[in-house]
Image: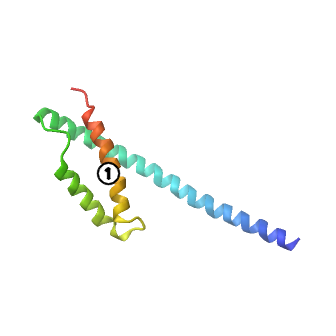
Amino acid sequence: MLGTSLRGETETSTDVQLAKCRAQIDEADEQIVQWLNRRAAVVVDVGKIKKKAKLPVTAPARERQVLARIADKGKAGPLSPEALQRIYTTIIQEMKGLEKNLPG
């Protein structure tokens, strides 16, 4: 009987801990989405400027600069600089698609 009670308490404690962590993940996800949309809004502005100036969407030197900066900033975190670069490569691709498909 005691073993069952302890196991039940442990499961409850684990459930509570997981729920707290998952709530933090949900909050972080919400902030990430807000920041991605903020970044996208700036990309739209950049795209309009480039269209007006007849500049290409793709700027390889700028992309390399962003990826290098991200790798440098990511040295302290649990994600490796390489993992962050892979994530940002996807972000950059999506932003280029957004910029490319602007009307006008």
Q: Residue at x 33, y 69 (%)?
A: 75
Figure check: 57 above or below 4 = above
x and y percent of residue 12 in the render?
Answer: 72, 63
x and y percent of residue 71 in the render?
Answer: 30, 63
Q: Residue furthest right?
A: 1
Query: Is residue 79 or residue 27 the one in the foreground?
Result: 79
x and y percent of residue 89 in the render?
Answer: 32, 51
Q: How is the image coloured?
A: rainbow
Q: Residue at x 38, y 60 (%)?
A: 83
Figure check: 82 above or below 36 = below
Query: Is residue 17 or residue 80 the one in the foreground?
Result: 80
Q: Please state, as top left, top right, bottom left or bottom right, where the N terminus lies in the image.
A: bottom right
Q: Quadrant of residue 57?
A: top left
Query: Is residue 57 or residue 25 the one in the foreground?
Result: 57
Q: Residue furthest top?
A: 104
Pointer 1 residue: 89
Q: Quadrant of residue 19?
A: bottom right
Amino acid marked by disc 1: Thr
x and y percent of residue 36 in the render?
Answer: 36, 47
Q: Residue at x 19, y 49 (%)?
A: 60
Q: Residue furthest left?
A: 53
- Judge from the rendering whether residue 64 lies leftward or rightward of residue 55; answer left or right: right
- Judge from the rendering whether residue 38 lies leftward or rightward of residue 15; answer left or right: left
- Tag 1, which secondary structure? helix
**How many circles with numbers are drawn on the protein?**
1
Q: Please state, as top left, top right, bottom left or bottom right, where the C terminus lies in the image.
A: top left
**Other residues around mark 1 within 10 Å, as few (<14) / some (14–19) / many (≥20):** some
